[in-house]
Amino acid sequence: MAIQIRKTGLQIETTLIEGGKAAAVPLKLFSAFAVVNNPWAGRGFVEDLKPEIHAAAPILGELLTKMIIEAVGSGEAVEGYGKAAVVGLNGEIEHASALIHTLRFGNFYRQAVGAKSYLAFCNTRGPANAPIMIPLMDKNDEGRRSHYLTIQTSIPDAPAADEIVVALGASVGGRPHHRIGDRYQDLKDLGQDVANPAGV
């Protein structure tokens, strides 16, 4: 079954004040989503998911990446990034995972923003209006905690039982007033080699 996109959406959130204190640089969060039919719903247990992954993931990766980049203004301006999928109640978590955990989806976004780190992710199952949680991390530095962020949103009529919501998220900036340090300081405090945290 070909992928069918029922609707798309874009959300932009700007945080000007956090903790009662004005942000020196406002945090901007962007999320783009597509609501699509679940190509595996109603077919029983499908062993081979690849045909639908290969057909759908590039379409969704290209579409959502374009939506994010146009909203932000450039790929270079994106600092934090992530992805998520929510499958409706007639689907498996594997169906949500299938559309986002493939290079055919994620490489569009990575290349557009010039990223080095992996895409943070969340895949869940739920009814219409279920929370859509998009975790973010710095696109080039996995240990930069200021950019550990989560975009939370929902769609009143999606996912239907036989649909999947696929989403990308981006940040311009990190948490206002971040003050917990980065992972590297913890490693130093614990006496571990910052360049070789696993000790190998």
Image: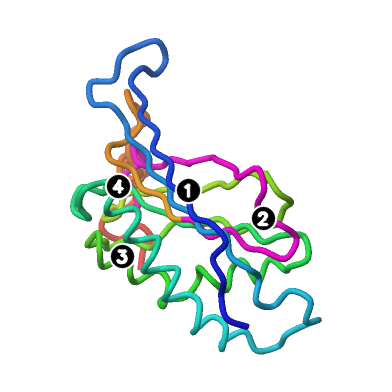
Q: CA distance from mark 4 to mark 2?
A: 24 Å
Q: CA distance from mark 3 to mark 4?
A: 16 Å
Q: Which residues are magenta?
A: 142-167
* N-term mark: 4 or 1: 4
Query: Do residues under tags 3 and 4 come within 8 Å of each other at their CB atoms?
Result: no
Tell me how many marks there are.
Answer: 4
Instruction: Give the labeled residue for mark 3.
Output: 110
Q: Position of residue 62 (x, y in %)?
A: 36, 69
Instruction: Give the labeled residue for mark 4.
Output: 71
Q: CA distance from mark 2 to mark 3?
A: 26 Å
Instruction: Give the labeled residue for mark 1.
Output: 135
In the picture provided, is 200 more to the left or to the right than 37? left
Occupied quadrant, residue 181:
top left
* N-term mark: 2 or 1: 1
Say if residue 189 shows up in the picture: no
Q: Is residue 127 above or below residue 36?
A: above
Q: CA distance from mark 1 to mark 3?
A: 15 Å
- Protein image colouring: rainbow
Q: Amino acid at mark 4?
A: Ala
Instruction: Give the labeled residue for mark 2.
Output: 159
**CA neighbours of label 3 inside 10 A, class few (<14), some (14 to 19), many (20+):** many
Q: Amino acid at mark 1?
A: Pro
Q: Position of residue 31 (x, y in %)?
A: 43, 47
* N-term mark: 1 or 3: 3
**CA neighbours of label 4 inside 10 A, class few (<14), some (14 to 19), many (20+):** some
